[in-house]
Image (cartoon, rainbow, N blue to C red):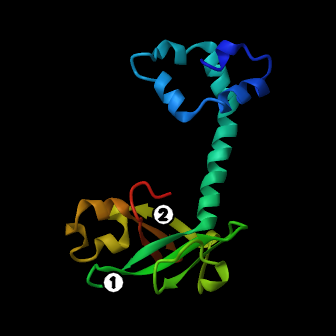
Amino acid sequence: MRALTTKPSSLDQFKSKLQNLSYTEILKYASPERMNQEDFQSRPILELKEKIQPEILELIKQQRLNRLVEGTCFRKLNSRRRQDKFWYCRLSPNHKVLHYGDLEESPQGEVPHDSLQDKLPVADIKAVVTGKDCPHMKEKGALKQNKEVLELAFSILYDSSGQLNFIAPDKEAD
């Protein structure tokens, strides 16, 4: 609404006005008592949403892929459920292979693809499961551990019985 009040004459001018609004400024204007649901159902807003939504979804997709290419360090659970070792997993720049491998300590920055010994072609991935559906959370006693670890667990299933098991660093992890 703030960008529209300036009556931009083109979509580019409108986008420019939107980019000049900071996140905190938008939050200030978007307080619940100031928002009117009818405004969001108006024809111009719905048309604008329809027009820019594909571009925004593509941007989100690219950001997520870029984050996967950067990779992440994960704590490795041993048989006694202790998290004292590390491993790293990242997507190749061409998005076709997951590279992963054990590390002695938590890395400072990205780990190069060639230093990760193991590979999994993305085409071989059959499913991604989370929480109590993860094989490493079904193990004896794992379901009894705290709920937070259960919420952070996910697994990539491949081939007939292959799996990569993860515990995310935190809920906000990318």
Q: Amino acid at mark 1?
A: Asn
In the depicted structure, whether residue 67 falls above or below residue 165:
above
- State yes or no: discs 2 and 1 in contact (Cβ < 8 Å): no
Q: Of helix, strand and loop, which one carries label 1?
A: loop
Q: How many marks?
A: 2
Residue at 43% x, 63% y is: 129
Which quadrant would residue 134 be assigned to in this image?
bottom left
Residue annotated with mark 2: 128
Residue drawn 53% across the image and 77% down it: 159
Q: x and y percent of residue 62 in the render? A: 66, 52
**Of residues 114 and 28, which is closer to you in this image?**
28
Residue bearing mark 1: 78
The answer to which of 165 and 66 lies nearer the viewer is 66
**86 horizontally vs 119: left or right:** left
Which of the 4 image quadrants contains residue 132? Answer: bottom left
Q: Is residue 161 visible?
A: no
- Answer whether residue 31 is visible to the viewer in this image: yes
Query: What amino acid is at disc 2?
Result: Val
Q: First in sequence, mark 2 or 1: give its number.
A: 1
**93 horizontally vs 139: left or right:** right
Q: Residues within 10 Å of mark 2 (few under 14, many from 20)?
A: some
Instruction: Check the picture and name the quadrant holding the N terminus.
Output: top right
* Along the line of sight, the residue nearer the viewer: 101 or 16: 16
Image height of 24 relative to 36, above or below: below
